[in-house]
Image (cartoon, grey):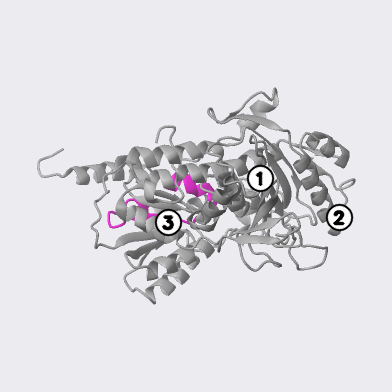
Amino acid sequence: MTKGTTRRRFIKGAAAALGAGFAHSFTARSYARIIGSNEDIRVAVAGCRSQGASHMQTYLGMKGARLVKICDADSAVLGTRLAEARGKDPSVEGEADVRRVIEDAGIDAIVAATPNHWHALLVVWACQAGKHIYVEKPVTHCIWEGRRIIEAARKYNRVVQCGMQRRSDPCWPAAFEWIREGHLGKMLYSRGLCYVRRDSIGKVSGPQEIPKSVDYNLWSGPREMKPLMRRNLHYDWHWAWLTGNGDLGNNGVHQADIAAWSIGASELAPACVSVGGRFGYDDDGETPNTQICIFDYKPVPVISEVRGLPLEQGGEALPQFLNCRVNNIIHCEGGYIMGGSAYEYEEKGTALGRKATRIRSFGESGGSGHRENFIEAVRAGKQSVANAPPVTGHVAAGLCHQANISHRIGRMATPDEIEESLKYDSGALETFERFREHLGRNGVDLRTDRAVLGPRLKFDPKMERFVGNGALDERANALLKDDYREPFVIPEEV
């Protein structure tokens, strides 16, 4: 280092010499700053389509925070959002390459609203660069990434807020406490329901042209730049294993989180099984649109359900549970807690008796205040202030990954075979019967249109590996970690 050269200038020069893709390992912690109590938190949003656009509008209007930059690998999306942002604040800047956002010393916090396969890498890079980060759900694309984001937040002392916004709802802790006080007797099991109507994404006969506005190298990031084998690049990536995690990992992760939260789970499930498939149409989607997952926590199991088809074939109405539109149900000996957008029950977070007699309401569920909580934690410089720390996001996403791994190494099975495999648990059998009835209403006969029965996989939550499943362990453990593409690689040691 020559005389008069600052450490930061030397670091940045060295990083530039090796290429922008490797800059993050050189800038680790170098841009962290102490934030004054009266200063705005300077925020950048990476990924500006639906959820990212919502974040953008939030930080444009939030007291104590200031949106300074937005980023997207699609120049058309970026241009549209930049015009919207500058309508409120002309100083907002745009950027295509998220690496330049990470390296920008004028940014304190980043919001990651990119496709799933980018989430964990952005957390690691942001923490290394001394920035706090709000990462959308699911916070990881595979189980292995969960420990990396936990380690990165801890090592670099950065705030990581996971996009599990229901963690900022006061109704759930109040309901859980009420159950623990014994008002409904012993908890039997906790159920998460992701009932969201999904149409077919269509079927193509060959590779499709990447939109000219998209930098496909940046969009693909950590994953292989494969030919586009679906009509739409955007959003439909949710239904491809390379980049998405199906609706279980898309919306169902919220319900899995509440279910795990209700039983006090702080680790992944010791065993899981999935039954599911892509029913009702033939398209290019790879992930299940109808799925049930049993997580064998003791003494209270968690059951997750995904339904993408309507209530009945040809209709538009959404599927229901107990004649209601609900997201979570906690079953107890003396009744149950229902949470979500109920048709019959206007209030959310409601405790009901066995005959559906309302006993008590705990208030609204929806996650308002979660983004404000992130800014509060950043200003305090304390991870403990954030309502959804990395381990919360890891467990919620990890449950979805566990079930999807069971599905991906499963086999087509008859209804009798599925019933035989689930007979160890009455709740699982009841769930399968409703699963079968729902598909029947949509013209699907499981005797001919077979479901995929995943193996019941045992899991070591400490090692975070599948164990005790014989030859299946090798296949299951091969899906714990993604293959990464240089230079977009999450290191073994963050």
Mark nearer the viewer, 3 or 1: 1
Q: Contact, CB < 8 Å: mark 3 with mark 2?
A: no
Give coordinates of residue 201: x percent, y percent. 70, 59
Residue, x 53% and y 27% (percent of image)?
463
Residue, x 43% and y 60% (percent of image)?
371
Disc assigned to residue 440: 2
**Res 7 quadrant in image:** top left
Mark nearer the viewer, 1 or 2: 1
**Res 310 quadrant in image:** bottom right
The residue that label 1 is drawn on is 185
Disc assigned to residue 72: none
Q: Amino acid at mark 1?
A: Gly
The residue that label 3 is drawn on is 111
- Image quarter hosting the N terminus: top left
Is 484 within the magenta?
A: no
Q: Nearer the viewer, residue 105 or 1?
A: 105
Give coordinates of residue 381: x percent, y percent. 31, 50
Q: Residues within 10 Å of mark 3 (few under 14, many from 20)?
A: many
